[in-house]
Image (tube, rainbow, N blue to C red):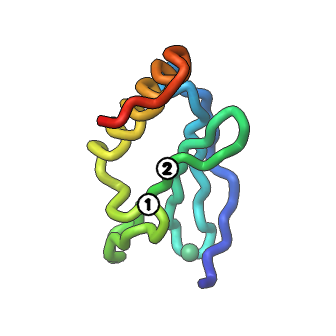
């Protein structure tokens, strides 16, 4: 509690086909980064804390914050697009 998020940057990522949105808390400098789809859905989020803060998991994402999860997310995005063109989802 207590973060005050201010818009920081938002950029369209062609490869991710999503908005990479960063908010920054103007009280403590923590940055919240999220991928937003074109429909406004938040697909992944991570927090990066300034020096002196411990990194904490983001509840609804789990151990988000590592780059590998971001690439995993991107893989999901592209495979779900492929699935939808095939008509139904594949169980892996
Ligand atoms: Zn804060």
Marks 2 and 1, how far apart in space? 7 Å
**Residue 10 x, y percent position in the rendering:** 63, 39
| Residue that protrudes farthest toward the right in the picture | 39
Q: Earlier in the sequence, mark 2 or mark 1?
A: 2
Residue behind label 1 places its C-beta within 8 angstroms of ligand 1:
no
| Residue that protrudes farthest toward the top in the picture | 85
| Residue 49 shown left or right of residue 22 in the figure | left
Write down which quadrant ligand 1 falls in.
Answer: bottom right
Q: Which mark is residue 19?
A: none
Q: Is residue 62 above or below residue 70?
A: below
Q: Which element type, helix, strand or loop, lies under badge 1?
A: loop
Asked whether disc 2 touches disc 1, contact meaning CB atoms under 8 Å apart, the reply is yes
Question: Which quadrant, please, contains the N terminus?
Answer: bottom right
Closer to the camera, 41 or 49?
A: 41
**Residue 76 x, y percent position in the rendering:** 41, 34
Q: Which mark is residue 44?
A: 2
Residue at 37% in and 69% down: 57
Image quadrant assignment for residue 56: bottom left
Residue behind label 2 places its C-beta within 8 angstroms of ligand 1:
no
Residue at 61% in and 55% down: 23
**Residue 72 x, y percent position in the rendering:** 33, 39
Residue at 53% in and 74% down: 28
Image quadrant assignment for residue 71: top left
User: How many marks on residues?
Assistant: 2
Q: Is residue 53 above or below residue 11?
A: below
Q: Which mark is residue 61?
A: 1
Q: Is residue 57 above or below residue 68?
A: below
């Amino acid at each position: 509690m207590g973060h005050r998020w201010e818009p920081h940057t938002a950029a369209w990522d062609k490869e991710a086909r999503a908005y990479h949105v960063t908010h920054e808390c103007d009280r403590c400098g923590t940055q919240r980064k999220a991928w937003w789809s074109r429909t406004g859905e938040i697909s992944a989020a991570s927090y990066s804390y300034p020096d002196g803060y411990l990194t904490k998991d983001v509840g609804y994402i789990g151990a988000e914050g590592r780059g590998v999860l971001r690439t995993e997310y991107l893989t999901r995005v592209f495979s779900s697009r492929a699935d939808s063109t095939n008509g139904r989802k594949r169980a892996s």
